[in-house]
Amino acid sequence: MKQILPIIFLLILIVGLCAGCANPNAQNTKGDQHFDSFVIKAASTPVGRLYYIHGYYNTIDSFRQMQYPAQLEAQFHAKGWEIVYIDWPALNPAIGASTFSSDQGKAYVDSFKSFMTKLDASLAPVPKTVIGGFSFGGIHSVWAAEAIHADAVFAMQPVVIVSALTEFKGLDTTYADMASHVIPQNFWMAYGTLDDRVDGPMDATIPALQPYLHAYVTDHTANYNTGGAENADMEAWLNQTLIGGF
């Protein structure tokens, strides 16, 4: 048995090292009990950093495998950007009533903003920072922009009123809703109205959001996988918004 133990330890060590060899530019950074991050490093000194936040019922892995987000990741990476994916593994999909029922979502939102502040402070400074999210990640991008500096923020078909989601139906989510937060100065938003998990007011006519509504899409699910046109529109906006372009 004493002879076998060193061999087992060596095998565990080799497996651990090889796991990191699969993608030398990828780095998992452990978060708190609610949130986590996964960094795709730039090949050289990054020209900027994209914080990218997935939607409900996704993990980082499942999100990256979809055509729409994968395309965006590839385009940012090709231009020399570092991509930092944000995850909430402990709360997804059990985020609903137990988290939001007593305080309109305040504890969750404030915890997320605290995580983003600490994460951003732990990473090296970069010339440009963009925050973006899809669906439920879209509203997270607005919360994140209250916590850290961002040169531009985008929300792809975002959840605007949290209680519109089936999991939050009947709850008072006022604190978490987009209208309760400061809309970033440089903000791009595309809107979707069809989502089989939405049973509530997904209303693109909210007055405070009208100036930022750059595109209107009607099929949330289809555009989740084939949103090349949205990617192109958003990237064109980034080229106009960011100093020196995207």
Image (cartoon, rainbow, N blue to C red):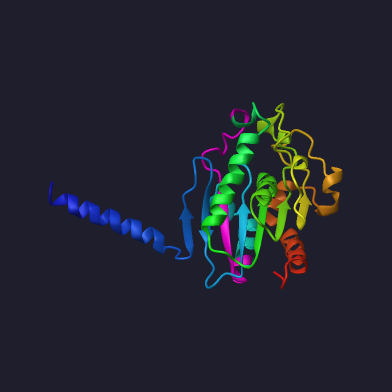
Figure quadrant of residue 17: bottom left
- Count of numbered marks: 0
* Camera-side residue of 18 and 228: 18
- Residue plotted at (72% across, 55% down): 154
Q: Position of residue 49 (x, y in %)?
A: 60, 63
- Can the viewer see residue 26? yes
- Magenta stretch encompasses residue 72: no
Above or below, 110 against 81 in this view is above
Residue 67 horizontal side relative to residue 25, left or right: right
- Can the viewer see residue 58? no
Figure quadrant of residue 173: top right
Q: Position of residue 38 (x, y in %)?
A: 51, 55
- Residue plotted at (63% across, 40% down): 109
* Camera-side residue of 198 and 35: 35
Above or below, 226 against 25 in this view is above
Q: Quadrant of the C terminus?
A: bottom right
Q: Position of residue 67 (x, y in %)?
A: 63, 57
Q: Which residues are magenta?
A: 76-98
